Amino acid sequence: MAKAGKRRRLSEAYRPSAPRRSVIDLGRLRTYRLAQRKSKVNTKLFASPLPKGGSFRRFLGSLPAILGAADLHRVIDAVVTAKRRGRPVLVGMGSHPIKVGLNPLFIELMERGVIKGIALNGSGIIHDVELGLHGQTSEEVEAGIDDGSFGMAEETATIINRAISEGARAGLGIGEAIGRRLTNRASFPHNRYSLLAAAVRCHVPVTVHVAIGTDIIHMHPSCDGAAVGAASLRDFHRLTQLVAGLNQGVYLNIGSAVILPEVFLKAVTIARNLGFPARDFTTVNMDFIQHYRPVTNVVRRPTQHSGRGYALTGHHEIMVPLLVAGILDALPSSHGRR
């Protein structure tokens, strides 16, 4: 009997209490009419089907005026506005845009007087020289890494390293030294596809920013580290001079995730430290994915108090032709060239 009484007392101790009335009374929620709310999307922004035979301008107009498509329009407008106002458009890029066949588009923008300066990393000159020399570039790394043949093309290293060494002695930066060499049509029969050769022809400065050990030409005995360093530093100073006059202009970073975003930020810092009006410009990062450094050092930090920054994500071989086509479509066709 004692045990039964103990069980009853325990049961009573753990008996659940009666449910209390909830303080969450959904019937008291405050609501509003949908028409009163500000919405980010409406049907006026929607895409529209492109009719057969429609123009490129109509295609651009058919895109939804939302997110990336809206930013694409804004970037086109920024570049075109800078061109009309005589403000500079600078392009910093890795080698991937060159390797996917975009040189003719950048050359056209130089010839039309849109691009006023180009900054490359070290691999950019490698692919540009190979294109000018043989009309082909971009080796299969996997095929040559096992037997040590990767990067051992003799002409590539000899031509570039010799041009850098001779250019350094003449007081030239890497971009100008390589560009001058590429203008020789007899030695470079495909130089109509060369970005650097076109830049010399159009009087557009090209600067090259090298990290020692990152490029195949550094593996060859013809590489002179002192010459590479001196010429690349000279190019950094030249880029800084271009950035110093970037106010109300545009800077596009295309396919460089580390080197050029870092170089650009330092150039901006020097220009502002020396009192130049390097503010109120537009920056753009274009790449497959948005990496930390270009988003931070190109899109955000330089424009945090003035200017605008945009990130356009997608394949270069698709996005850059769209951008360039939009720019060229908005420029005068008869007197837009230099």
Image: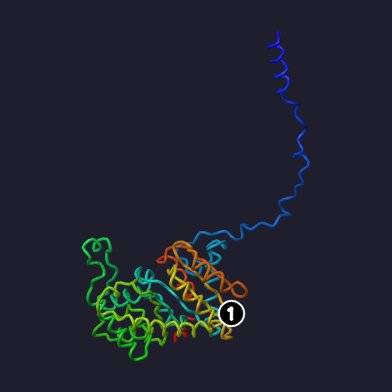
Furthest toward the front, the residue is: 2
Q: Please tell me how crowded label 1 is: few (under 14), some (14-19), or many (20+) other residues with Cα within 10 Å.
A: many
Q: Quadrant of residue 84?
A: bottom right
x and y percent of residue 232 in the render? 39, 81
Vertical comparison of 292 with 157: above or below: above
x and y percent of residue 257 in the render? 44, 67
Name the image quarter holding the N terminus: top right
Vertical comparison of 242 with 261: above or below: below
Furthest toward the bottom, the residue is: 170
Vertical comparison of 36 with 60: above or below: above
Query: 63 and 220: which one is in front?
Result: 220
Vertical comparison of 274 with 138: above or below: below
- Residue at left 24%, top 85%? 186
- Left or right, 98 with respect to 18, comes to left
Kindly identify the amino acid type of the residue bearing the numbered disc 1.
Arg
Assign a secondary structure to mark 1. loop
Q: Which residue in the protein does label 1 denote? A: 279
- Residue at left 59%, top 75%? 307
x and y percent of residue 56 in the render? 47, 69
- Residue at left 45%, top 62%? 314
Query: 322 and 309: which one is in front?
Result: 309
